[in-house]
Every structure is written in C-alpha cells, then in structure tokens.
Amino acid sequence: MSSGSFFSWAALGILCTLLLAFIRVCRGPSAEDRLLGIQSFGTVGTAVVILLYLVEGSSGYLDVALVMAMLAAVTVITFTRILPGAGDVDPGEAPAPQSEPPAS
Amino acid sequence: MIVFDLLSALFICMGVFFFFASAVGLLRFPDTLCRMHALAKADNLALGCVILGAVFQQTDPLIIGKLLLIWVVTLLSSATGGFLLAQRIRRKHLAQQEAG
C-alpha cells in the first residue's frame, strides 16, 4: 500500500467519526451539546486537512488547517459571550457579569 | 527511512482510534459536562497523534514548526472554549437551583 492511499484511508476513517458527532448535534438535548459537536468538527477538520496535506504535498493546506484551528475558538466565544441569550433562554438566568456590551 | 514511515503510520492509527473514542464518548456519555470531558481530552490527543505522525514525514523545519503551531493553537482554543462553555453551564445550573 502506498503512503498516499494510507493517508487517504486514515482521513476517511476520521471523517466517519464526524458522522457520530453529527448524530449528537442533531439530537442533543441542550444547545451546549450541539455546540460540543460543532467544536469537534473543528478538530476533526484540522486533522483531515493535515492528512490531505500529506497526500497532496501543497503547503497551502497547512494554512487552511491553521485557520480552522483558530476559527474553532471563535464559534464558542460567539456563542457564550456575544450572544448570551442564544440557544436555550432561561428566564432566571442572570446576565453575564463580566461580559462586554457588543460594540455597535 | 522505513522506521519513520512505520512510526508515522503508528501515530496516525492512534489518532484515528482516539478520534473514534472521542466521538463514541460524545455520543454515549449522559451529561453535557461528561461529553465535554470526552471531547476536550480525546480530541486534542488524537490531533496531537496525527500531527506527530505528519511530523515524521517532513524534513523542512519550517513545515514542522507550522504543524506544531497548529497543535498549540488547537490546545489554546480548546482550553478557552471549554472554560467558557463550562462557565455557561454552571451559571445555568445555579439559575435553575435558585428558580426551583
């Protein structure tokens, strides 16, 4: 087996775990569970792009992986800080004490 | 360089295994905090294994540094996201306790 096809099969196996995470995103009882699934999409996508870099050898893939790793944090920060009422809205939930008001 | 190829294959297979473990944990664990525990540990370990396997294929120090930088950025973003999400869940539990 050539090394390129080995890396392709490994990327395919990692992509199959995305399906399992997608089940959790579909039926997660709370919005935080769905967000956890989305967070795993970031990590899995980074690993798949790195394996694609090993197959193709073009160094642009590494920049894509770097950007995906950085954007994984942005979703969580947006969910928890900038949109404090997004997802599950609890009537008794106090507003976040140290959150900055959104710049408008 | 057959040794490096074997090490690379070994680490990438470990990465695939840990990705499966993290997905199964995300699917099977009963609580949101338990799921976060499975995801934060196993996913980052799996990505580290895949990156280590990729490092064994490279000779250029610039590429190796970039691969390691990807792992460090992922660790930092996972730590930040885990803290923020756990804080939000805890605040929600406290609000539920006060309400009921």
Image: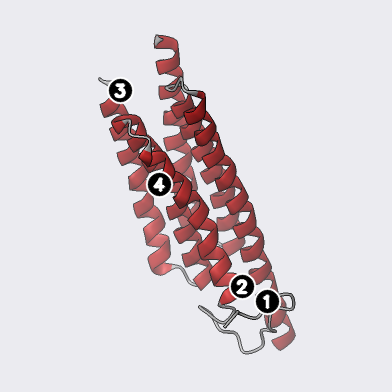
Residue linked to disc 2? A81
N-terminal-most mark, 3 or 2: 3
Element class at badge 4: helix
Which residue appears at 45% of the width and 60% of the height?
A38
The disc placed on residue B92 is none
For marks 4 and 2, give the CA distance: 26 Å
Asked if residue B5 is positioned above or below residue B54 in the image, the reply reads above
Question: Does B42 sit left or right of B83 as displayed?
Answer: left
Q: Residues within 10 Å of mark 2 (few under 14, many from 20)?
A: some
Query: Residues at badges 2 and 1 in contact (C-beta under 8 Å)?
Result: yes
N-terminal-most mark, 2 or 1: 2
Rendering coords of residue B2 (x, y %): 39, 10
Query: Residues at badges 4 and 3 in contact (C-beta under 8 Å)?
Result: no
N-terminal-most mark, 3 or 1: 3
Element class at badge 1: loop
Residue linked to disc 3? A3
User: What kind of residue is marked 3?
Assistant: Ser
